[in-house]
């Protein structure tokens, strides 16, 4: 199969239908590691600079009209003291896991991002091994105050 990598940002906006397809894809294929679809869409809006934000990008791997993998990176605008990019969402279609699509997407997204990249991953998420192979480390303990 011929896979196409697409990069969307404020200069190359996906159609509303494509945005909906990407949000639906991520909502479905993030499994238990995902968020509500409205938050995925809000993250994509941030990346595409639909409101006052630092931007970012959305990247997909597609085969024809079928999305096989997708990611959303947000820019932080805080280089030097916090990584310039946060990988917020990444998923591979459940029927295509183990084919190297997640690794391909990650490598291309990292190459496209300017500056350091941070991400959050659950301890039991199988993708943790991929992130470690790509050079991600866990130098900090994250703590949150939830309100």
Image: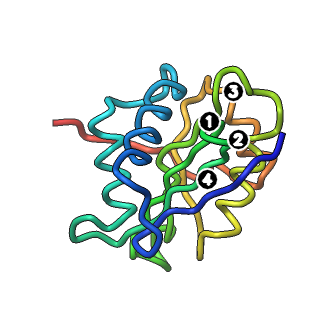
The answer for how far apart the CA atoms under marks 2 and 4 are is 37 Å
Q: Nearer the viewer, residue 59 or 123?
A: 59
- Name the residue beneath numbered marker 3: 126
Q: Which of marks 3 and 1 is in front?
A: 1
Looking at the image, which residue is at 57% across and 42% down? 90
Marks 3/1: CA–CA distance: 24 Å
Query: Which secondary structure, mark 3?
Result: loop
The residue identified by callout 4 is 139
Identify the residue position indicated by label 1 in the image: 66
Q: Estimate the x, y position of residue 96 in percent, counting from the top left.
A: 74, 27
Q: How far apart are marks 4 and 3 (CA)?
A: 19 Å
Tell me if mark 1 has few (under 14), some (14-19) or many (20+) residues whose alpha carbon lies within 10 angstroms of its own.
few
Are circles 4 and 1 on residues that touch, CB within 8 Å?
no
* Nearer the camera: disc 2 or disc 4: 2
Q: Mark 3–mark 2 contact, CB under 8 Å?
A: no
Q: Which of the marked residues, 4 or 1, is nearer the chain's N terminus? A: 1
């Amino acid at each position: 199969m011929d896979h196409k990598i697409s990069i969307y940002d404020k200069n190359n906006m996906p159609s509303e239908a494509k945005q909906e397809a990407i949000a639906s894809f991520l909502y479905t294929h993030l499994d238990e590691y995902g968020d509500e679809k409205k938050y995925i869409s809000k993250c994509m809006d941030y990346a595409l600079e639909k409101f006052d934000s630092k931007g970012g990008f959305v990247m997909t791997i597609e085969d024809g009209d079928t999305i096989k993998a997708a990611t959303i990176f947000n820019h932080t605008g805080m280089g030097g003291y916090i990584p310039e990019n946060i990988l917020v969402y990444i998923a591979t279609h459940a029927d295509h896991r183990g084919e190297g699509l997640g690794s391909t997407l990650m490598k291309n997204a990292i190459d496209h991002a300017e500056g350091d990249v941070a991400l959050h991953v659950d301890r039991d998420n199988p993708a943790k091994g991929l992130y470690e192979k790509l050079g991600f480390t866990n130098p900090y303990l994250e703590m949150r105050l939830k309100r």
